[in-house]
């Protein structure tokens, strides 16, 4: 039997509650979007399973929050090491259930593992203060303590990294968690939880649930007074619903939501470098990234050159099932998602977009959509949407000021890209962009050691960097009579 088949036959498909792998109330099929075949049937949690997960997390919090930071860090460090050692096996799982190509999947696994390493190091650096009050009447002590039971909800597009970016800081801080992965990609989450178990995470510290339908079950969990923190990554639409639900009990929320990233090519940019950066910023994960470049604003002096070079490079990408040799563009996560991309392109063309390459749904099975380049006017409807697919709409701009104004004309503000030959000019533009992150002359800047998060309706709070652990800590001031 081939190694690949064996990986899937050996996969766990159960829920993980209080340190035990358990069956739920029913099962949910997980499909390979490149051929619609069912690769596993995972357990779906009942209301009782969800309640058991909260009980377990609340019980385990008593001891995990008191466990020495060094010990917590070493568990995460061990999980990092296992993930790196098993990166190929994990990449197969990601690629198979998500559709992305193996190189992207392996890149994601290594990136995901780094969150465990980074937060294993941060666990021992949670700081505080000790100082005199200005009047000298007391000492001011400020300490940080773990906030408590945290509910973590993750999307399908980075099934490994979005989970470790939350579990890492939560465990480092001393919190216990209930992880709810996306129904499309639960196998990766199960594999990561199994690694945490092998790394020595005590029972109840990490729990994995998969309720379907999701909304009512999550609403019920958020009503439980023991759940005090919600960390969500997903669409702005679902984020808004959760913020409303969390408001009833004033639950702490960290929200990593949708994006609509502008990619600015200023008139002095190096076109070849901008095209290479555009390929990375657009095509990583087949465009299914909250950080994906979604709108290209290119100075009129370079527009023709940039457009023809980008279209040529995009048209050469090999579209094939993610796990097949040499694949550069895999399937979208589902036919439903693929059809959304196709509809966006069709309505963009109806509104005047010109197709430079791609733009046509292929025949046959699988959720494939080709790499597509469009030239559009700045009022084309596709510019107002998060495309989440391999589609690059290009708008011609006549000045930096115009590019900035168009880039900022959105309710999103996650990331922006700027290409320029002049760093001073690029920094000026970066400062004017309403965006939580700006990449200058680079197509990818995500880094576990850097703050990740958005302005405006792209989110609340930051993950990664020094800020990430703060989302799982409460600050306490203790005043001492001296
Ligand atoms: P989604 O919002 O549909 O789902 C995200 C998660 O929320 C899934 O686990 C889903 O099952 C769950 N969910 C859905 N309805 C819910 C409800 N009513 N209550 C509670 N949970 C619910 O998003 P998606 O399609 O899985 O992912 C794509 C979106 O995620 C895009 O908008 C993308 O930009 C965003 N995203 C953002 C970041 C970031 O860091 N800002 C990173 C990755 C993805």
Image (spheres, rainbow, N blue to C red):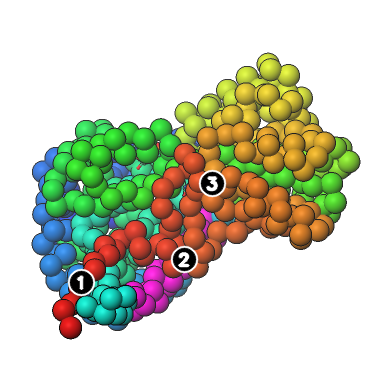
Residue 110 sits inside the magenta stretch? yes
- Look at the image and tell me whether residue 289 can be seen: no
Q: Count the marks.
A: 3
SS type, badge 2: loop
* Extent of the magenta region: 105-127
Camera-side residue of 446 and 21: 446
Q: In the rendered image, which residue does mark 2 sit on?
A: 465
- Dot 1 or dot 2: first in sequence order is 2
**Quadrant of the displayed image that contains ligand 1:** top left
- Give the label, 3 or 1, closer to the camera: 1
Camera-side residue of 213 and 194: 213
Residue in the image at 49% along x and 60% along y: 451
User: In the rendered view, would you say 345 is above or below 118?
Assistant: above
Q: In the rendered image, which residue does mark 3 sit on?
A: 414
Q: Position of residue 469 (x, y in %)?
A: 36, 65
User: In the rendered view, would you say 72 is above or below 323?
Assistant: below
Q: Quadrant of residue 12?
A: bottom left
- Dot 3 or dot 1: first in sequence order is 3
Q: Position of residue 178 (x, y in %)?
A: 24, 53
Tag of residue 478: 1
CB of residue at label 3: within 8 Å of ligand 1?
Answer: yes
Q: What is the CA distance from the residue labelled 3 to the residue labelled 1?
A: 36 Å
- Dot 3 or dot 2: first in sequence order is 3
């Amino acid at each position: 039997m081939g190694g690949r088949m064996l990986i899937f036959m050996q996969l766990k498909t159960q829920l993980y509650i209080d340190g035990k792998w358990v069956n739920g109330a029913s099962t949910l099929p997980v499909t390979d979007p490149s051929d619609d075949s069912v690769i596993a049937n995972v357990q779906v949690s009942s209301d009782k399973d969800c309640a058991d997960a909260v009980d377990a997390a609340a019980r385990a919090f008593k001891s995990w929050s008191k466990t020495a930071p060094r010990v917590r860090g070493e568990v995460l460090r061990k999980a990092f090491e296992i993930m790196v050692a098993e990166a190929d096996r994990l990449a197969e799982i990601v690629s198979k259930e998500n559709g992305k190509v193996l190189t992207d999947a392996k890149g994601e696994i290594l990136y995901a593992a780094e969150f465990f390493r980074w937060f294993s190091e941060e666990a021992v650096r949670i700081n505080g203060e000790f100082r005199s009050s200005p009047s000298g009447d007391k000492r001011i002590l400020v300490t940080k303590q773990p906030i408590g039971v945290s509910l973590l909800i993750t999307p399908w597009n980075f099934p490994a990294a979005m989970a470790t970016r939350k579990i890492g800081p939560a465990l480092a801080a001393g919190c216990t968690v209930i992880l709810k992965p996306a129904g499309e990609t639960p196998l990766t989450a199960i594999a990561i939880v199994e690694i945490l178990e092998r790394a020595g995470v005590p029972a109840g510290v990490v729990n994995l649930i998969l309720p379907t339908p999701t909304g009512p079950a999550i609403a019920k969990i958020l009503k439980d007074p023991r759940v005090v923190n919600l960390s969500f990554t997903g669409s702005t639409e679902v984020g808004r619903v959760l913020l409303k639900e969390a408001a009833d009990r004033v639950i702490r929320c960290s929200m990593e939501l949708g994006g609509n990233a502008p990619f600015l090519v200023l008139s002095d940019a190096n076109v070849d470098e901008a095209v290479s950066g555009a390929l990375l910023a657009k095509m990583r994960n087949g465009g299914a990234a909250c950080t994906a470049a979604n709108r290209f604003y290119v100075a009129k002096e370079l527009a023709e050159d940039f457009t023809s070079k980008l279209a040529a490079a995009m048209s050469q990408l090999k579209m094939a099932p993610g796990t097949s040799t040499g694949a550069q563009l895999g399937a979208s996560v589902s036919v439903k998602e693929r059809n959304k991309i196709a509809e966006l392109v069709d309505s963009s063309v109806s509104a005047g977009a010109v197709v430079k390459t791609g733009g046509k749904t292929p025949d046959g099975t699988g959720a494939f959509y080709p790499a597509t380049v469009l030239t559009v006017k700045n009022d084309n409807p596709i510019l107002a949407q998060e495309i989440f697919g391999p589609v690059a709409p290009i708008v011609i701009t006549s000045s930096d000021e115009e590019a900035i104004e168009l880039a900022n004309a959105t309710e999103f503000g996650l990331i922006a890209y700027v290409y320029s030959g002049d760093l001073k000019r690029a920094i000026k533009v970066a400062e004017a962009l309403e965006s939580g992150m700006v990449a200058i002359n680079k197509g990818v800047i995500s880094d576990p050691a850097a703050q990740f998060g958005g302005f405006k309706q792209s989110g609340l709070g930051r993950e990664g960097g020094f800020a990430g652990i703060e989302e799982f800590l409460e600050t306490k001031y203790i005043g001492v009579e001296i």
